[in-house]
């Protein structure tokens, strides 16, 4: 009998917590359309990989973090050509303005997989998590898969 009382008190406490947490979590969740996710097949010995994807967010948001179980870490990079030299830099975030399709594509913004745990072979799937922050500051984690394609040469840049 005593035990039963304890349980119901604990349950009541849980319900209160859930009620407090729910409205904020649902009101600000972001809906993002993910299309054309693919990764470039790696050359033998290559320890980095590039992933590309088209993202369209229903509301103003930003891609703030990426991850993959196939790499030690994943980073957001931009790439540009300055005086004929390809330069790349890490980005803290990629803005996703409402209703606009933002394309992560070769020669531009990309997801870089650093310290790959295995080669990326054509036809394989690369699991990825994308952390999207809405303007209301809430974080949504998207789980996607990028298909590995053998396109052109290996990465134009190596770490
Ligand atoms: Cu890069």
Image (cartoon, grey):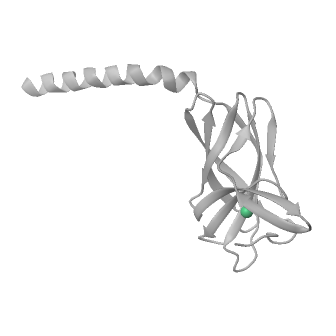
Residue 141: x and y, percent?
57, 41
Along the horizontal axis of the image, is 102 left or right of 112?
right
Q: Which residue lies furthest to the bottom in this view?
A: 45
Residue 31: x and y, percent?
66, 31
Residue 122 lies in what quarter of the image? bottom right
Which one is nearer the viewer's eye here, 27 or 118? 27
- Image quadrant holding the C terminus, namely bottom right
Which one is nearer the viewer's eye here, 147 or 135? 135
Along the horizontal axis of the image, is 7 left or right of 101?
left
Residue 38 lies in what quarter of the image? bottom right
| Image height of 11 relative to 107, above or below | above
- Which residue is rendered at x = 33% and y = 21% of the image? 15
Quadrant for ligand 1 reads bottom right
Residue 126: x and y, percent?
66, 58
Q: Residue furthest left?
A: 2
State whether residue 150 appears in this view.
no
Along the horizontal axis of the image, is 107 left or right of 69?
right
Which one is nearer the viewer's eye here, 74 or 1? 74
- Which residue is rendered at x = 22% and y = 26% of the image? 10
Residue 28 lies in what quarter of the image? top right
- Which residue is rendered at x = 62% and y = 45% of the image? 64
Residue 97: x and y, percent?
75, 33
Which one is nearer the viewer's eye here, 18 or 89? 89
- Which residue is rendered at x = 63% and y = 66% of the image? 114
| Image height of 130 relative to 119, above or below | above
């Amino acid at each position: 009998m005593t035990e039963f009382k304890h349980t119901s008190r604990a349950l009541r406490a849980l319900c209160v917590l859930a009620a407090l947490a729910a409205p904020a979590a649902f009101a600000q969740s972001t809906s993002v359309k993910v299309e054309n996710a693919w990764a470039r097949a790696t050359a033998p010995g290559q320890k980095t990989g590039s992933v590309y994807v088209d993202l369209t967010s229903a509301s103003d948001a930003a891609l703030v973090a990426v991850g993959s179980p196939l790499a030690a870490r994943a980073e957001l990079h931009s790439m540009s050509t300055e005086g004929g030299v390809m330069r790349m830099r890490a980005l803290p975030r990629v803005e996703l303005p409402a209703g606009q399709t933002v394309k992560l594509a070769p020669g531009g913004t990309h997801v870089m997989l650093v310290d790959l745990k295995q080669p990326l072979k054509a036809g394989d799937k690369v699991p990825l998590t994308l952390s999207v922050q809405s303007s209301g500051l809430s974080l949504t984690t998207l789980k996607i898969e990028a298909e590995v394609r053998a396109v052109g040469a290996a990465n134009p840049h190596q770490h």
